[in-house]
Image (tube, rainbow, N blue to C red):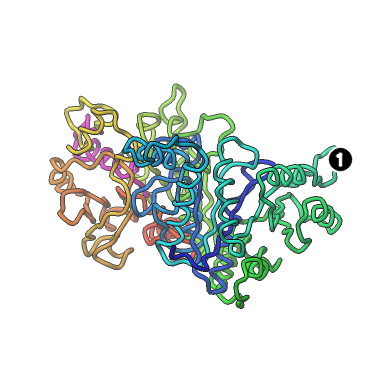
């Protein structure tokens, strides 16, 4: 195998989930990249879904879409944002994918009559995928995050693969366990026992962690560190205290302060290089913390009535994209969530409440919930010249709003909601019809990166500064080509289209009419990066910032 000398860092969770394995993995990746190594990040999701596309965002957070079109969980988004580069389909796997490959192979008689079993066959398919991710892009180090917590049923085979990999490459593998040290209110003392138990559990798989990243609400003292070192059998300087921080972007800087870059390289028998590559990152963190002013952005969405689920998870990339563009122009976007249904319920909230925002954003979405409320909000933003930014559904609804209220096509609609509408301004493309009829919903939308041609003299062109751009997509419906001429004659500008001119990619009003009224069929938020903010988000925030000053 062309993997001579490739290094693997496995990141495993102990004690409980949700303590930041993804950010820890991203941060280690950034640290090593900052030391001149080429790093690749891989996420393993133990669930049986073949990809994250069929899951409601209230289940597992926002669905992230790779350039290739693969629908993944939001950790992949964090990885891309921290590393500032695109990842590929090989860098993501779920149990569903792994089992599907094994079962397909079994059906094709490729196991030559053998009994097909979890070990070795499923384990070896996991290893095959880990090697594929390591070799395809010429990276030197793979950081591989295994989802879930040690002790779960569903991630055991992945841990088994991680164990075997060290057997095959004794000097090339490190295990990092991310755990949590609780401080129960009644005791007021930070407890290490859950971490000790988690390490013992991991030991029972035959894996001994080389590092412990101990998350907690405050920094760990020396006494706790010594305790963990003795009981978990880990060098004291390999125990990294990771207290809660103001921003996730501080984490790599804190790790570096704890010398983690050097320690990881030593562990992997790699030359210890200087950390020279974090300069821009430090600047970015400074800028995010010291804005010159605040602008208020109202996000009109749904996913509000889902119990204790964290709303911000469903729109993670949008929130982060706003932060990056804000940092670039010295403004802090203060985000407020507006439940679209509030404008249409029995005793509706007065739409006038939207006037206090410097900008209004309608993000992507599916289905009927809240859409009339969103259309009302868009109309209000248009009529009152409040900067408006529509993402995907937010663009489709913006075109429907325009058709209804400016062109007088009162029953203009999307066939997603009203299949029988006499005016399907937003409609499904022929190739999607067959898929829907066959109930074939997984991975069948317009997904991944597509080229767009941007018209000169438009707000979009001014923002991008170029004629051809690439954006990522995730939708089934499009602006109906049969209505395009009529809408354009009515004053809405289609400022970007597919290269063949058939699909409308961006719609906007001319600046003389509205400071910023723009919607995009793509999801630009998926390509916004801390060190490379997205130009459309920046243009939107600039417009919002001007409204604030005015
Ligand atoms: N529901 C719309 C469609 O499928 C928009 C999707 C989205 O906003 N991602 O086309």
| Along the line of sight, the residue nearer the viewer: 282 or 208 | 208
62 above or below 115?
below
Q: Residue 542 in the image: state x and y as whole percent.
A: 42, 61
Indicate the quadrant containing the C terminus: top left, top right, bottom left or bottom right: bottom left
**Residue 501 % position (x, y):** 16, 53
Residue 144: name its quadrant: bottom right
Give the image quarter of residue 429.
top left
Q: Residue furthest top?
A: 346
In terms of depth relative to the viewer, which is nearer, 293 or 187? 187
**Along the horizontal axis of the image, is 148 left or right of 180?**
left
Q: Is residue 489 left or right of residue 236?
A: left
Residue positioned 47% across, 34% down in the render:
303
Q: What are the residue bounds of the magenta stretch?
A: 389-414
Indicate which quadrant contains ligand 1: top left
Per the image, the residue denoted by label 1 is 187
In the rendered image, the quadrant that contains the N terminus is bottom left
The answer to which of 138 and 62 lies nearer the viewer is: 138
Residue 257 horizontal/vertical position (percent): 69, 68
Q: Position of residue 213 (x, y in %)?
A: 69, 55
**Where 359 falls versus 530 (above or below)?**
above
Residue 327 visible in the shown view: yes
Does dot 1 land on a helix, a strand or a loop?
loop
């Amino acid at each position: 195998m062309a993997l001579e000398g490739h290094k693997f860092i496995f990141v495993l969770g102990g004690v409980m989930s949700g303590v930041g394995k993804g950010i820890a993995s991203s941060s280690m990746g950034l640290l090593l990249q900052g030391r001149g190594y080429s790093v690749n990040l891989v996420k393993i999701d133990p669930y049986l879904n073949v990809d994250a596309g069929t899951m409601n965002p209230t289940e597992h957070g926002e669905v992230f879409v790779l350039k290739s079109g693969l629908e993944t969980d939001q950790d992949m988004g964090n990885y891309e944002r921290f590393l500032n580069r695109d990842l590929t389909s090989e860098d993501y796997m779920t149990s569903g994918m792994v089992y599907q490959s094994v079962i397909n192979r079994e059906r094709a008689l490729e196991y030559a009559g053998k009994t097909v079993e979890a070990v070795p066959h499923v384990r070896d398919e996991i290893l095959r995928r880990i090697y594929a991710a390591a070799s395809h892009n010429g990276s030197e180090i793979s950081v591989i995050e295994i989802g879930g917590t040690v002790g779960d049923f569903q991630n055991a085979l992945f841990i088994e693969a991680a164990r075997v990999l060290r057997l095959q490459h004794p000097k090339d593998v490190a295990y990092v366990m991310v755990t949590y040290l609780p401080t129960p209110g009644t005791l007021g003392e930070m407890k290490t026992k859950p971490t000790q138990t988690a390490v013992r559990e991991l030991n029972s798989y035959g894996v001994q962690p080389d590092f412990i990243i101990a998350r907690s609400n405050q920094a760990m003292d020396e006494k706790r560190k010594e305790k963990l070192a003795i009981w978990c059998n880990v060098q004291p300087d390999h125990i990294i205290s990771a207290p809660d921080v103001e921003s996730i972007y501080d984490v790599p800087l804190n790790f570096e302060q704890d010398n983690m870059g050097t320690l990881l390289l030593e562990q992997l028998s790699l030359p210890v290089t200087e950390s020279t590559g974090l300069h821009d990152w430090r600047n970015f963190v400074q800028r995010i913390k010291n804005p010159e002013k605040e602008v208020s952005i109202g996000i009109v969405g749904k996913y509000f009535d889902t119990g204790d689920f964290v709303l911000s998870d469903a729109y993670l990339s949008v929130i982060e994209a706003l932060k990056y563009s804000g940092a670039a122009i010295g403004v802090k976007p203060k985000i407020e969530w507006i439940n679209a249904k509030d404008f249409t319920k029995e005793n509706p909230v007065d739409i006038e409440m939207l006037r206090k925002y410097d900008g209004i954003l309608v993000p992507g979405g599916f289905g009927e919930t809240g859409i009339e409320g969103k259309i009302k909000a868009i109309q209000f933003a248009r009529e009152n010249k409040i900067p408006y930014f529509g993402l995907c559904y937010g663009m489709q609804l913006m075109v429907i709003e325009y058709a209804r209220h400016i062109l007088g096509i009162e029953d203009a609609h999307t066939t997603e909601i009203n299949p029988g509408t006499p005016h399907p301004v937003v409609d499904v493309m022929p190739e999607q019809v067959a898929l829907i009829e066959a109930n074939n919903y997984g991975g069948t939308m317009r997904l991944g990166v597509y080229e767009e041609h941007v018209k000169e003299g438009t707000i979009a062109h001014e923002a991008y500064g170029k004629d051809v751009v690439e954006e990522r997509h995730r939708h089934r419906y499009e602006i109906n080509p049969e209505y395009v001429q009529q809408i354009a004659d009515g004053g809405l500008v289609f400022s970007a289209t597919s290269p063949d001119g058939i699909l409308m990619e961006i719609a906007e009003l001319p600046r003389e009419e509205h400071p910023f009224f723009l919607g995009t069929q793509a999801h630009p938020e998926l390509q916004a990066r801390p060190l490379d903010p997205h130009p459309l988000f920046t243009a939107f925030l600039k417009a919002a910032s001007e409204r604030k000053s005015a």
